[in-house]
Image (cartoon, rainbow, N blue to C red):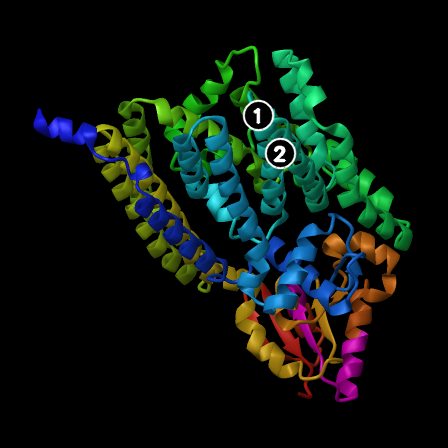
Amino acid sequence: MNLQNQEQNAQSPFDSPRTLWALAIGFLIVWFYMLGARTLVPTDEGRYAEMGREMLATGDWITLRLNGIKYFEKPPLQNWMNALTFAVFGLGDWQARLWTGLCGLIGVASVAYTGNKLFSRRVGIIAALVLGSSFYWAGMGHVNSLDMGLSGMMVLCMCGLLVGQRDGVSDTERRNAMLVCWAGMALATMSKGLIGFVLPGAVLVIYTLLTRNWALWARLHMGKGLILFFAITAPWFILIALKNPEHPHFFFIHEHFQRFTSGVHNRGGAWYYFFPFLLLGIVPWLGVLLQGLWTGVKEQSHGFQPRKLLLVWAVFFFFFFSISGSKLPGYILPIFPALALLIAFYVDQCQARALKIAAILFALLGLTGLLFVNKAAGLGSNAFEIPLYQGYAAWLYVAAGMTLLGGLTAWYVAGKGAAGKDWALILLASAGFIAGQVAFLGHDPWGKYIAGSAHIPAMKAELTKLDTPLYAVGRYEQALPFYLERTLTLVEFPDEMEFGLKQQPELWIPDRADFVARWRAHNQRGEAAVAIVRTDIYKEFQQQNLPMRVIGEDPRRVIIATTHP
């Protein structure tokens, strides 16, 4: 009995500033270290790093370019942030990921603040633990893509609305919170386009219809908010349209309406496309996901219903992208902050039994990994890839072992009173976060292979002059231009730059025969030139007796140079 009383009366780690500071500092050390621990992986990471590099190199902060070609698919915020980072810290992997890394931390800090304001200090702490350790949020925070940049701004919008509309808020705090909400919408729009305000607006409409809380619309500070929104968004949209009259139609019609309603980008998927990413992405909190969502379903009150709004946010975003004609895994990332707050609210009040079930589910995931990782080690279609699979399998074994151990330990301590339950939360979060980062770190050899970074020294040895031609024949390399600090001349394969090349056809060689003639001329004049060639095209060049030296080769590409080094 005395032992039970000691367990019940033990201090919660959430009441210890020293424990919380230790967790925060350890988390941040790992978070920032991992920003530079891996090579930039195509396509997104190389693309947006290179666009930021070109923006800084050209000094043109209005017209976006990729490989020197007009590229109007997305707004400029991420490119601006990357270019500013490069200007301050130089070029590099961690610099290219700094903006998305900060956006991930903005999300964690925002849900902590919002949970504290809406519910309690404990809910705020738990929400930060849940979001910071969720496999998808922690992973995408270390990927240089637009999805985390968008999500970081979306969470400002969501949390600003929640804090500003909660019951009992003062007029000043409501105004300030709503301005944060409007600024978040504007920055989300500058990150990825119209969805930055269309989707939050739709959430608000649906929430109002469900709750009949029409008075909320009078508390949005719409006048000030719209002024702030257009002050942030309008200048760039006006300037780029003035400099590039073709931009508005391509951006608003092709990249928004056609992208959503058709498969114009060949990124379709079944209606259940996002379910596996949701289930994997919320690990280690999968065992309490449905319970967290249910807290939003059953919330009923005459005032503001924050859990209901969080539920609408998560469900509508998931539904919207599920019915879209364009699907990519990162699209559902903005729902995870809402899920974190719902899960935190439930976990704060649940019995230890529910948390023990979540811990066992997490442990079973680790056990499954240990049993089946060997299957990954046996994959590989060629001698080059087999060692990569085997090497990655070793890292996955470590991640799976940490998952199993973390889940079992959390299960054991969850029943040790209130303090044990809180320690179980910390153990689940820590094991989930570290195991996920181990899995990401182990992928780096694959990342180097996909990026082609092993060939950079040989290519730089040939590209000793700035005017040495560099071609990409039948493929476009998304990462090598950033590492080489120069653009490529595309041959035959326009890739995603097709629209820009229609505006600037002089920047590429559409016919392979013209490239062959130009390559022979380089050799005849004794000029240095380098080309990255698709493997099947290289075999055709061999049959044509094209004069060339192979300076790099792997199953994805062959890199050739002229015969006169």
Residue range of the region highlighted in magenta in the rendering: 517-538
Q: What x and y, as percent, mark residue 212?
A: 64, 11
Q: What x and y, as percent, mark residue 323?
A: 65, 28
Question: Residue 528 colored magenta?
Answer: yes
Query: Which residue is at the far left?
Result: 1
Between the C-alphas of marks 1 and 2, the distance is: 10 Å
Q: Secondary structure at mark 1?
A: loop
| On screen, residue 556 above or below 117 | below
In this rendered view, identify the residue nearer to me: 550 or 499: 499
Label drawn at residue 557: none
Q: Is 158 on the left or on the right of 62, as rendered?
A: left
N-terminal-most mark, 1 or 2: 1
The residue at which mark 1 appears reads as 169
Q: Is residue 432 visible?
A: yes
Q: Residue at x 77, y 61 (%)?
A: 492
- What residue type is disc 2 on? Ala
- What residue type is disc 1 on? Val
Q: Residue at x 24, y 35 (%)?
A: 11
The image quarter containing residue 421 is: top left
**CA neighbours of label 1 inside 10 A, class few (<14), some (14 to 19), many (20+):** few
Q: Is 365 on the left or on the right of 237, as rendered?
A: left
The image quarter containing residue 392 is: bottom left
**CA neighbours of label 2 inside 10 A, class few (<14), some (14 to 19), many (20+):** many
In this rendered view, identify the residue nearer to me: 46 or 55: 55
The residue at which mark 2 appears reads as 177
| On screen, residue 559 above or below 276 | below
Q: Residue at x 79, y 61 (%)?
A: 69
Q: Is label 1 in contact with label 2 (beta carbons under 8 Å)? A: yes
